Amino acid sequence: MNLSLDYAIEMDQKDPLKSYRDLFHIPKDKFGNDLIYFCGNSLGLQPKTTKSYIEQELKDWAELGVEGHIEAKNPWLPYHEFLTESMAKVVGAKPIEVVTMNTLTANLHFMMVSFYQPNKKRYKIVIESDAFPSDKYAVESQLRHHGYDDKEGLILWKPRKGEELLRYEDLEQIMQDQGNEIALIMIGGVNYYTGQYFDLKRITELGHKHGCKVGFDCAHGGGNVPLNLHNSGADFAIWCSYKYLNSGPGSLSGCFVHERYAYDKNLNRFTGWWSHNKETRFNMRHDFDVLPGAEGWQLSNPPILSLAAIRASLDIFNEAGMDALRDKSIKLTGYFEYLMNGLGDDVVRIITPSNPKERGCQLSIQVKNANKELHDKLTDSGVITDWREPDVIRCAPVPLYNTFQDVYLMVERLKGLL
Ligand SMILES: *Cc1c(COP(=O)(O)O)cnc(C)c1O
């Protein structure tokens, strides 16, 4: 690696995934130049194919009306099934373990209906101290829903004084001290703030050893890191499709339930007609007969237009392959880290782990004495990142559509502002 623009140009030329950028709409500044878009961790860019996938469904709806459920080119009744295999590949799961449904926080609640079943002795929930607010609110409301105090029942896995990252020893200590009172460990697979990518398998094994259920919110993991959900052994996981999975604002969420529960009819769950046996779903007077696998957690017939957008995106992921994406991602973010460190550690500090195995593409950067003004100036200079209080700029160079030159230019512009 070196500090020259030529190096970035050469890396882009050698990039086996370089053609993928052209599959996306890249937002432009007012002069028509491509913005440097490092916000795929918040809202991924739109694939150019998304429009035609959605238009197909609009056309079939216009021409077929209700018949589209069966007669559409891609029949709507089984439409979610068209996504399952690709989605399962992206998160390292078996197809029976994965379904696309609802939105993320809604799925977190539905998963807790099944996997947070507290009793007087065992009712506490562990989360990261800096969990995404929605996760914290959801977990607190589950505690209250079951009649527990949302302060006393919530255990925070905290970083040590003066540190940002979480240490496994500290989670082990929590489990040793209170493991027999803990019902659920619910951790963000990749922390939204620091970008720390946790060892899902290690946390799961620890939790299971103490008799707890373990689930992960992989909002910042899906499409970013190889989650290997099946092998992690986690009981459940959820993730959204609008961040790294490029499926449009507010699009549906992915949900994973481990295979060991696929045929468990006794597990408590909330159900609807879409969790019922497909063969008899429309003979409306049957007793409830739950579908096997993650599909058995669906409630409603899903919004096809949103599924169509997800399908367009998953087709791109499938073609590129998570292995190749991860390969490039490690190089791209490594390059970004190298240039940032070149600015001097008295100027910027990266709080994201430096070990590539412990992070995805995002780097969370603290700039000495900076406030939101710096972030706003960066935006004005054509670099789209996001600001998290109190003092972090999150930047996510995404392997599908970002380039080494994006990274180079971003650092140059930041340097110009310092
Ligand atoms: C983005 C994100 C959410 C957002 O939840 P929605 O239900 O999709 O609005 C929740 N949790 C985490 C960890 C996130 O990163």
Image (tube, rainbow, N blue to C red):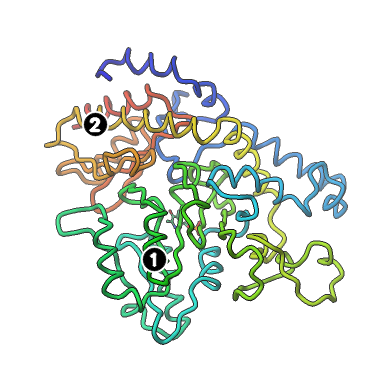
Q: Give the quadrant of the N terminus.
A: top left
341, 1: nearer the viewer: 1
The residue sitting at 71% across, 45% down in the picture is 82
Whole-percent x, y for residue 84 in the image: 65, 48
Whole-percent x, y for residue 399 in the image: 45, 31
Q: Nearer the viewer, mark 2 or mark 1?
A: 1
Please state if 40 lies on the left or on the right of 379 as rendered. Answer: right
Whole-percent x, y for residue 383 in the image: 36, 33
Which residue is farthest left? 346
Mark 1 sits on what residue?
207
Q: Is the C-beta of the residue carrying label 2 under 8 Å from the nearest atom of ligand 1?
A: no
The kind of secondary structure element at disc 2 is helix
Q: Amino acid at mark 1?
A: Gly
Q: CA distance from mark 2 to mark 1?
A: 37 Å
374, 188: nearer the viewer: 188
Mark 2 sits on what residue?
340
Taking 280 as reference, is 309 above or below it? above
